[in-house]
Image (cartoon, rainbow, N blue to C red):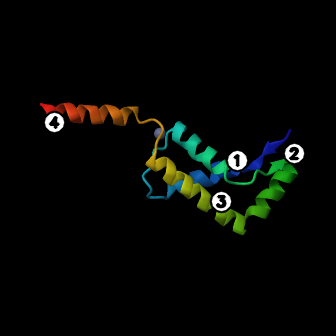
Amino acid sequence: MIKNIMEDIVGECLTEILKDTNIKVCKCQKCISDIMALTLNHVKPKYVSTKKGEIYTRVELQNSQLKVDLMDTIIKSILIVARNPRHNQKIDKIQKIDKIEKID
Ligand SMILES: [Zn+2]
């Protein structure tokens, strides 16, 4: 079975970053998926077909410039989603309520 190991690695790095970042970003499934997709579109996929290949890629990635670049890309994606969450229905409702209050 072929899999893009970057999907797992991005997911793990993202969890790590979100744990100790002070960027205010929604952490719902939708936004997390958005951040993942944005990041994965910017990083080269790494396909592996065996567990051995997966371990090799993980070791290779550790302490490398690639990992630094990956973390950087993830943070940029978090910032994009933080600024434009795709589910602003709730925010829209709040704004509408605000407007009604102002008219009153
Ligand atoms: Zn969200």
- Reply above or below: 3 against 89: below
Of marks 3 and 1, which one's residue comes earlier in the chain? 1
- What distance separates the C-alpha of mark 2 from that of mark 1? 14 Å
Name the residue type under label 4.
Lys
Q: Name the residue at 55% across, 57% down.
A: 76
Q: Secondary structure at mark 2?
A: loop
- Residue that appears at 63% across and 51% down: 39
Marks 3, 4: nearer the viewer: 4
Q: Which residue is mark 2?
A: 49
* Labels 2 and 1 touching (C-beta < 8 A): no
Q: Tag on residue 8?
A: 1
Q: Determine the CA span between mark 1 and mark 4.
A: 48 Å
Measured as percent of width and height from the top left, residue 17 is found at 55, 57
Q: Quadrant of the N terminus?
A: top right
Asked whether disc 1 touches disc 4, contact meaning CB atoms under 8 Å apart, the reply is no
Mark before the other along the chain sequence, 2 or 1: 1
**Which circle marks residue 70 in the picture?**
3
